[in-house]
Image (cartoon, helix red, strand yellow):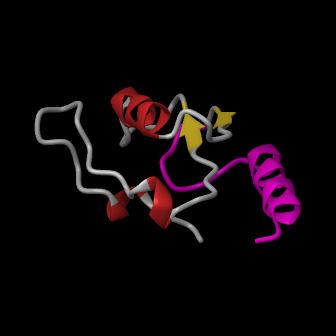
Amino acid sequence: MHCPCSAAPGPVDGTSRTLPEPADTPRRLPAANTEDPVTPPSAVRAWRTAYPSAKYVRYRYGGHIQVPDEAAARIARWVERSGG
């Protein structure tokens, strides 16, 4: 299941975020775009703190919505291996 940024309330103080409970999303693959003009680096840090064992797809793209083909292929492989 895809959990877009809008599913997590934005930070009140610029750093803290309300994230899904680990039990509610047992498998996760956060996508971290280092050039995202909308989602700040603090969002990725919040996910890394909340889910230290999660795998991450890191990529660079000058936008917020689209994922480059290479990152999309990595996400597809993860979904196939995870059975979901």
Q: Position of residue 65 (x, y in %)?
A: 52, 56
Considering depth in this image, is 19 or 70 the residue closer to the camera?
19
Residue located 36% across and 42% down the image: 38
Q: Is residue 49 left or right of residue 75?
A: left
In the picture, which quadrant includes the C terminus? Answer: bottom right
Q: Quadrant of residue 40?
A: top left
Q: Where is residue 15 in the image (x, y as percent from the top left)?
A: 23, 30
Residue located 56% across and 36% down the image: 33
Q: Where is residue 54 in the image (x, y as percent from the top left)?
A: 62, 41
In the picture, which quadrant includes the N terminus? Answer: bottom right
Instruction: Give above or below for 32 relative to 6.
Output: above
Instruction: Give above or below for 30 relative to 20.
Output: above
Quick check: is 7 in the magenta stretch? Answer: no
Q: In this view, does 18 lie to the left or right of 13?
A: right
Quick check: is 65 in the magenta stretch? Answer: yes
Q: Where is residue 13 in the image (x, y as percent from the top left)?
A: 11, 33
Instruction: Give above or below for 47 relative to 15.
Output: below
Considering depth in this image, is 82 or 7 the residue closer to the camera?
82
Q: Give the range drawn in magenta.
A: 61-84
Considering depth in this image, is 69 or 58 the residue closer to the camera?
58
Q: Residue furthest left?
A: 13
Residue located 48% across and 48% down the image: 64
Considering depth in this image, is 23 or 84 the residue closer to the camera?
23
Q: Is residue 30 left or right of residue 13?
A: right
Residue located 35% across and 64% down the image: 7
Q: Which residue lies furthest to the front in this view?
A: 23
Q: Is residue 10 left or right of residue 55?
A: left
